[in-house]
Image (cartoon, rainbow, N blue to C red):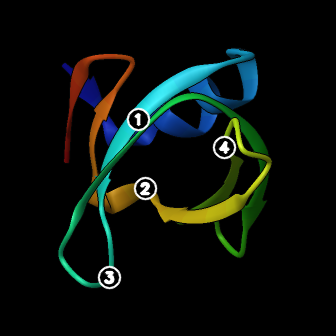
Amino acid sequence: MIHVSKIHTLVETIKEFSIKWISEQGEIISCDRCVFTSFHGKGNTFNIMLPSREVRTVNRYTLLEFNGEEVVL
């Protein structure tokens, strides 16, 4: 298990990672081989670049998994 407070450090240090999160519409979205690009505001949201080069914003409190490990609050 990974505590959500560790996500900030992990995304900045690991070059490529996989994540699974819940979208604003309630869908579970998973992404393999994504890359961190930037944090927003107080660090609650961050941008990732998908392998397709699309940039997505993710709220770290909606994360379910990081590199196959469960993310907990």
Q: What residue is drawn where x is 72% and y is 70%?
A: 40
Q: Which quarter of the image is occupied by the N terminus? A: top left
Is label 4 or label 2 in front?
4
Tell me whether the residue at label 4 lies in contact with that at label 2, contact meaning CB atoms closer than 8 angstroms.
no
Specify few, some or many for label 4: CA neighbours under 10 Å numbering under 14, 14-19, or 20 or more: some
Q: Nearer the viewer, residue 13 or 57?
A: 57
Rendered view: 57 above or below 31: below
Earlier in the chain: of badge 2 and badge 3, it is 3
The residue type indicated by label 4 comes to Leu
Give me the disc on residue 50. 4
Seen in the image, is 32 located left or right of residue 21? right
Earlier in the chain: of badge 2 and badge 1, it is 1
Rendered view: 2 above or below 27: above
Earlier in the chain: of badge 1 and badge 3, it is 1
Residue 20 quadrant = top left
Is label 2 or label 1 in front?
1
- Where residue 48 appears, x then y in whole percent? 68, 49
Q: What residue is drawn where x is 56% and y is 21%?
A: 17
Residue 38 seen anywhere in this rendered image of the structure = yes
The residue type indicated by label 2 comes to Arg
The residue type indicated by label 3 comes to Glu
Provide the residue designation for mark 2: 60
Provide the residue designation for mark 1: 19
Is label 4 or label 1 in front?
4
Earlier in the chain: of badge 4 and badge 2, it is 4
Q: What residue is drawn where x is 32% and y is 71%?
A: 23
Specify few, some or many for label 1: CA neighbours under 10 Å numbering under 14, 14-19, or 20 or more: many
